Amino acid sequence: MLSGRTILSYLENLDVYLGQFANKQSTYFEHLISLAFSQALYLPFYTIDNDDQSVGQRVTWQGSDKGGCLSLSPPGKPDIIAYCYGFYLIVEATQRTGAMQWTNEFAQAVRHCVDFVKANNVQPSQVYILLVTPKLHDDTYNSLRHHPLTAFKFVPLETDVLDKILNTSILALTIRHLDLRRFFNRVGEYIKKSSTLREFRKGCEEGIIIWQKEVLKQEKDAFIGIKSYEAMRKAKRAAVSVSEIFGNLLEDSFVKEYLNVLGETVDVGEIETSLKAQSLCCCAGKTIQTDEALFECVPCADFKGRGLRLIEAVENIDR
């Protein structure tokens, strides 16, 4: 399984990546998009060859990967199905950007969605139809704007927007499916409010930046706590000062990217607050010279055990 960063790199350099597969670009495009959703949703990835229906939440590419030889998803089925927490994604992915994009590629997604709703006994409101392509065509946009089946939630995504979704998910670490669903709902609103494809694109460009900041702001406490814990572990000492942690964070490229996208900074106070809020450390006294706080890592097993007990407590509420 490719790492999230590798998948993101392939998406950002899509022409170069697909250029390696002269005769099977559409197959590798589908496969890459399915991997991107698996990583963005933090869900296990399956193909039609090994799909495990006992796994409730998963991403299944309807294509095949027998013997390392990829082949396209068969006609009459969606390219990708993502079984998320509380909703589903029917994903159609195509490289085609010409005038027949809607007619030959995306129009069939409606039938796939209808079949999925009936087969799984779910409500249309629980299902999103995601249309993924490097570039939307005007005819596709106009077809979506005037589509008669208003019960269905269409979410057209150009790959540069998917790049940002995946990058945000990688950075946030603890992103919720609820946050992704919120953005998908907004894309639907951008379709309704716009009158041209250009206006729609502008809405998506502005909207994804706002959404990124919302998600990263919400997850900042957990992110800083985890990165601070990482800095403490790397120090390989029983107790580490908050200023040393701070210095390590300032040199961390991952932290720099997070703060750059968020448009904020981090200070010593936030480090201490985040570590305590996430129960990742305990106070180990203060330095003699500067009266600065020293922190000791909570063992990973202890942190994990606490997390499992919290999950059990929540689950017991409904029992």
Image: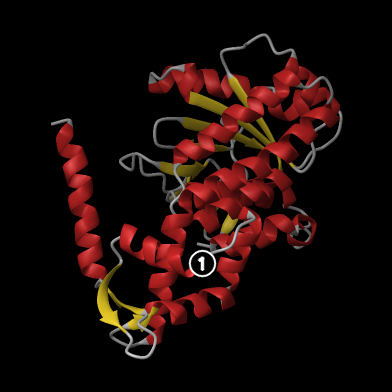
* Coordinates of residue 157 in the picture (x, y in percent): 69, 37
Name the one closer to the observer, 265 or 185: 265
Disc 1 residue type (three-letter):
Asp
Question: Quadrant of residue 137 in the image?
Answer: top right
**Farthest-out residue, bottom:** 289
Name the one closer to the observer, 89 or 291: 291
**Left or right: where does residue 145 sit relative to residue 218?**
right
Residue 64 in view in this figure: no
Residue at 76% x, 25% y is: 102
**Left or right: where does residue 40 sit relative to residue 275?**
right
* Coordinates of residue 79 in the picture (x, y in percent): 59, 37
Q: Is residue 11 above or below residue 133?
A: below
Label 1: how many Cα within 10 Å (few below 14, some 14–19, many 20+): few
* Coordinates of residue 296 in the picture (x, y in percent): 28, 77
Q: Is residue 226 above or below residue 214?
A: below
Q: How is the image coloured?
A: secondary structure
**Left or right: where does residue 11 sit relative to residue 248?**
right
Residue 213 in view in this figure: yes
Q: Is residue 16 above or below residue 284?
A: above
Query: Under tag 1, what secondary structure?
Result: loop
**Left or right: where does residue 134 sit relative to residue 121?**
right
Name the one closer to the observer, 210 or 68: 210
* Coordinates of residue 29 in the picture (x, y in percent): 68, 49
Residue at 74% x, 40% y is: 205
Q: Which residue is mark 1?
A: 267
Residue at 65% x, 49% y is: 164
Residue at 61% x, 54% y is: 262
Name the one closer to the observer, 40 or 219: 219
Q: How many marks?
A: 1
